[in-house]
Image (tube, rainbow, N blue to C red):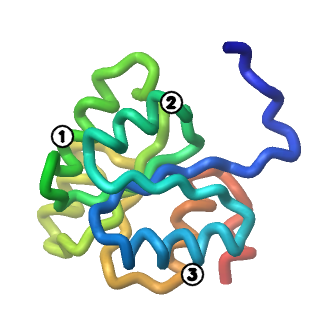
Amino acid sequence: MADRPVENKKRVLIYIEDEPAMIELVKLILEGHGYQVIAATGGQEGLDVIRETKPDLVLLDLMMPDMNGWDVYQQMKADEYMKGIPVIVVTAKAQNIDKVLGLHVAKVQDYVTKPFSPAQLLSSVRRVLGEDVEEAE
């Protein structure tokens, strides 16, 4: 399969999250700003969708019933095809140790704690994708 030109193409994000209400909220925020959001409702499904899609960015919940987010992240980073895809952890785990582990040990690109404002999420996505962050205000 040949790579298609990226010009005039929506950035594709995959959100791996087991809560339908959170998926709808994130889709509403990000699709309203021109992103295409593909939802996966569990870790294994998320890995499968990443392999099929090769997204620009993955938003990853940590607490899911089938496979926790850190397992998904480790599998992504061990896979030649997926390891270069940036990851933002989006989770209710707000303890400082979790954030330190995520940003400094696991080396995720960003860590967004639920609940978050639309501006916080959009700013994080734009920053990780290297886009102009000022528009997120």
> Residue at image x 38%, y 78%?
21
Q: Estimate how packed mark 3 is, as few (under 14), some (14 to 19) or many (20 or more) residues with alpha carbons within 10 Å.
A: some
Q: Residue furthest right?
A: 8
Query: Can you give x and y, in whole percent of width and height, for residue 47 in the image?
Result: 35, 36
* Left-right relation of 57 to 41: right
Asked if the residue under mark 2 is in contact with the one under mark 1, i.e. CB atoms within 8 Å, the reply is no
Instruction: Please state which amino acid type lies under the numbered disc 2.
Output: Glu
Label number found at residue 29: none
The answer to which image quadrant residue 90 occupies is bottom left
Q: CA distance from mark 1 to mark 3?
A: 28 Å
Q: Is residue 54 above or below residue 114?
A: above
* Left-right relation of 31 to 74: right
Query: Can you give x and y, in whole percent of width and height, for residue 14 in the image?
Result: 49, 50
Q: Nearer the viewer, residue 37 or 97?
A: 37
Instruction: Please state which amino acid type lies under the numbered disc 3.
Output: Ala
* Left-right relation of 23 to 91: right
Asked if the residue under mark 3 is in contact with the one under mark 1, i.e. CB atoms within 8 Å, the reply is no
> Residue at image x 74%, y 64%?
34
Looking at the rendered structure, the number of numbered marks drawn on it comes to 3
Asked if the residue under mark 3 is in contact with the one under mark 2, i.e. CB atoms within 8 Å, the reply is no
Q: Estimate how packed mark 2 is, as few (under 14), some (14 to 19) or many (20 or more) residues with alpha carbons within 10 Å.
A: few
The answer to which image quadrant residue 135 occupies is bottom right
Label number found at residue 119: 3
Mark 3 secondary-structure assignment: helix
Query: Can you give x and y, in whole percent of width and height, for residue 95 in the image?
Result: 14, 73
Query: Can you give x and y, in whole percent of width and height, for residue 66 in the image?
Result: 15, 49
Label number found at residue 71: 1
Chain-order first, disc 1 or disc 2: 2
Foreground: disc 1 or disc 3: 1
Q: Which residue is mark 2?
A: 52
Q: Is residue 95 above or below residue 110?
A: below
Foreground: disc 1 or disc 2: 2
